Image: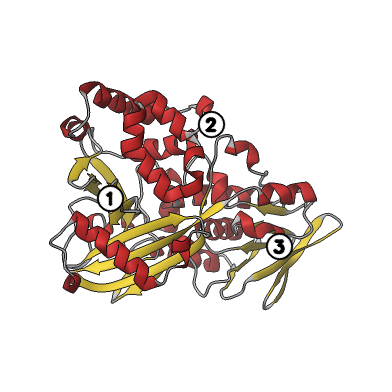
């Protein structure tokens, strides 16, 4: 039995701590925040427990389903028929062959090329050649310049800004494939959610850790990973030192070098070379629905928001509609420092453009959630940039969401990688 310290109580850290405790190790999980969950954490939205950052489940998220069965909450998985919209000044249905054929302003050849592109993306299981190609050149090569500039360029520009032209094609492909395969049939999208929200899984993991003898220390930020003679010895926190034979660190890679000063210089350079953008979710509780769609992509001059998510069209609890307006951007962008009211005003104006019947009196409540490290920048060839999970310091494993590449961030990937790290702990 090893003494294990896990740093970070997001989904990955919780999964790692649960697996390590269940395997018989002595586990301490330390978390800087006052509650567990990380990006899967909830808040009280005028009586409704909802997520700070929206999550949905696809049929391919097998690690999530396996863990839920193990924790005894498999019956909490709920599936819904959902749909996608596209707003270019008018709201169009999107995401299926008929919607593509009906969309105005494209030639039949352009529609055929776009449809073939989507079909191949969903069917392909491996596509190693595009890992070193940008999404811009890849999509343009398959679909043509007009398709890229109309449907993709606004999304990239308003999410990645100065990085927009240099995003990995492989990373985009896995996003298309994941959602494209999650369907009842060719026409109907199928997405899921956990009854009660992601906090249901978070709470089950917390209970599971404790049931197997693990200890969770909230409001306990890690200050330094301690090492001696090339081996990890513990974690210094704001509340004292936790001795360890093994440490699993799940904090964002930009924080690693300060947290682990004993890493070799070349490893520090690799962590420092991984860039992130921040995320702000502006959340509305509204008395009326904005659209019938779960998500709507936006491409309108003057609207610097790539899309909106009407979460209540997936998880419907109560009479109100819950809308997420996500802002992804480098933290150096001026909007990341905007006051909440500025963001709320811009986001609500966007919703009114989509649905002009929406009035200010329809707003029941609002919330603005911020995260400085919300999304790694995965440029072409990103796989070679990621350091190994096992570090040169014996007993120390480090990973964050960029280690899912080319998969995007998601609870299923967190569960998978967290369990793998726990199972790699030497006895």
Q: Quadrant of residue 222?
A: bottom right
The residue closer to the viewer here, 316 or 372, is 372
Asked if residue 152 is positioned above or below residue 361 in the image, the reply reads: above
| Picture residue at 23% right of the left edge, 32% below the top | 186
| Picture residue at 41% right of the left edge, 44% below the top | 156
Q: Position of residue 335 (x, y in %)?
A: 44, 62
Q: Residues within 10 Å of mark 3 (few under 14, many from 20)?
A: few
SS of the residue at dot 1? strand
Which residue does the numbered mark 3 point to in the structure image? 258
Q: Residues within 10 Å of mark 2 (few under 14, many from 20)?
A: many
Which residue does the numbered mark 2 point to in the structure image? 131
Mark 2 to mark 1: distance in Å? Answer: 27 Å
| Picture residue at 50% right of the left edge, 28% below the top | 130
On the rendered structure, is 190 left or right of 6?
A: left
SS of the residue at dot 3? helix
On the rendered structure, is 379 left or right of 352?
A: right
Identify the mark nearer the N-term, 1 or 3: 3
Q: Are marks 2 and 1 in contact (CB under 8 Å)?
A: no
Q: Quadrant of residue 288?
A: bottom left
Identify the mark nearer the N-term, 2 or 1: 2
Identify the mark nearer the N-term, 3 or 2: 2
Q: Are marks 3 and 2 in contact (CB under 8 Å)?
A: no
Q: Is residue 348 visible?
A: yes
The residue closer to the viewer here, 129 or 56, is 129
Q: Is residue 23 visible?
A: no
Mark 1 to mark 3: distance in Å? Answer: 38 Å
Q: Residues within 10 Å of mark 1 (few under 14, many from 20)?
A: many
Q: Which mark is residue 182?
A: none
Which residue does the numbered mark 1 point to in the structure image? 295
Q: Position of residue 22 (x, y in %)?
A: 57, 58
């Amino acid at each position: 039995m090893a003494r294990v310290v896990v740093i970070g109580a997001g989904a990955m850290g919780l999964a790692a701590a649960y697996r390590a405790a269940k395997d018989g190790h002595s586990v301490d999980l330390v978390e800087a925040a006052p509650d567990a969950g990380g990006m899967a954490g909830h808040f009280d939205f005028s009586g409704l427990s909802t997520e700070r950052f929206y999550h949905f489940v696809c049929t391919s998220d097998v690690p999530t389903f396996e863990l839920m069965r193990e924790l005894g909450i498999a019956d909490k998985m709920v599936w819904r028929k959902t749909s996608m919209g596209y707003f270019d000044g008018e709201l169009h249905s999107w995401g299926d062959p008929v919607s593509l054929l009906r969309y105005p302003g494209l030639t039949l050849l352009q529609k055929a090329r776009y449809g073939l592109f989507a079909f191949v993306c969903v069917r392909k299981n491996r596509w190693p050649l595009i890992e070193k190609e940008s999404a811009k050149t890849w999509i343009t090569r398959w679909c043509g310049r007009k398709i890229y500039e109309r449907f993709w360029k606004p999304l990239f520009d308003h999410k990645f800004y100065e990085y927009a032209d240099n995003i990995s094609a492989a990373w985009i492909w896995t996003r298309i494939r994941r959602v494209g395969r999650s369907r009842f049939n060719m026409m109907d999208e199928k997405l899921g959610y956990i009854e009660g929200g992601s906090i249901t899984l978070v709470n089950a993991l917390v209970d599971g850790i404790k049931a197997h003898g693990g200890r969770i220390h909230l409001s306990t930020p890690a200050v330094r990973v301690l090492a001696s003679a090339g081996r990890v010895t513990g974690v210094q926190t704001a509340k004292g030192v936790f001795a360890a034979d093994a440490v699993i660190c799940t904090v964002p890679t930009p924080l690693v070098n300060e947290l682990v000063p004993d890493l070799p210089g070349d490893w520090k350079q690799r962590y420092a070379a991984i860039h992130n953008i921040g995320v702000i979710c502006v959340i509305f509780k509204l008395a009326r629905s904005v659209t019938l769609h779960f998500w709507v992509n936006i491409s309108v001059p003057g609207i610097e928001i790539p899309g909106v998510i009407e979460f209540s069209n997936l998880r419907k609890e109560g009479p109100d509609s819950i809308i997420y307006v996500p802002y992804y951007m480098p933290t150096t962008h001026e909007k990341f420092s905007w006051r909440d009211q500025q963001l709320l005003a811009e986001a609500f104006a966007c919703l009114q453009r989509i649905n002009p019947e929406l009035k200010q009196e329809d707003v029941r409540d609002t919330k603005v959630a911020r995260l400085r490290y919300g999304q790694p920048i995965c440029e072409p060839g990103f796989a070679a940039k990621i350091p190994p999970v096992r570090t040169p310091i014996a007993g120390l494993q480090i990973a964050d969401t960029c280690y899912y590449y080319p998969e995007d961030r998601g609870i299923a990937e967190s569960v998978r990688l967290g369990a793998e790290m726990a199972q790699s702990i030497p006895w």
